[in-house]
Image: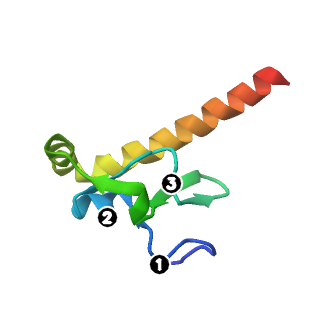
Amino acid sequence: MHRRKGKPEESKTVRQWGLLGRIPIDALKPSYIWETQTDGPVTVYYHEENTREMTESEEAAFLADIKGYGQRYLQMIIQERARLRRGGEDKA
């Protein structure tokens, strides 16, 4: 696996934290975003201090769709970036 310069080694993906029973506190504030020039954001990482213990319902949702769970967080980041770009264009 190639690691991009700047990715904090102690950070983990949403799936990795989920397997440990933790969830990001604020999905829109990752500690690192892995991006490619052609595809944009592809993986988001969070530090432990930016996570909390899952509730029972959050853990059940994670276990029901482990693969899709992390993708939802990625989509939130992509949608927020698009929203911010649109907002910036409206002001121009």
The residue at 16%/40% (across/down) is: 57
User: What's the amino acid at mark 2?
Assistant: Gln
User: Mark 1 Cα within 10 Å, few/some/many (few <14, many 20+)?
Assistant: few
Using the rendered view, name the quadrant where residue 11 is placed. bottom left
Using the rendered view, name the quadrant where residue 81 is placed. top right
Mark toward the viewer: 2 or 3: 3
User: In which quadrant of the rendered image does the C terminus lie?
Assistant: top right
When the figure is inspected, residue 6 is found, relative to residue 38, above or below; the finding is: below
Residue behind mark 3: 30
In the depicted view, which residue is nearer to us: 79 or 27? Answer: 27
User: What's the amino acid at mark 3?
Assistant: Pro
Give the mark nearer the N terminus: 2 vs 1.
1
Please say if the residues under marks 1 and 3 sit with CB atoms less than 8 Å apart. Answer: no
Q: Position of residue 36 (x, y in %)?
A: 62, 59
User: Mark 3 Cα within 10 Å, few/some/many (few <14, many 20+)?
Assistant: many
Q: Residue furthest right?
A: 92
Mark toward the viewer: 2 or 1: 2
User: What's the amino acid at mark 1?
Assistant: Met
What whole-number distance in Å separates the C-alpha atoms at marks 2 and 1?
16 Å
Using the rendered view, name the quadrant where residue 34 is placed. bottom right
Say left or right for 87 vs 59.
right
When the figure is inspected, residue 27 is found, relative to residue 34, above or below; the finding is: above
The residue at 23%/64% (across/down) is: 20
Q: Position of residue 52 (x, y in %)?
A: 31, 54
Residue behind mark 1: 1
What whole-number distance in Å separates the C-alpha atoms at marks 2 and 3?
14 Å
Element under label 1?
A: loop
When the figure is inspected, residue 7 is found, relative to residue 87, above or below; the finding is: below
Label placed on residue 38: none
Residue behind mark 2: 16
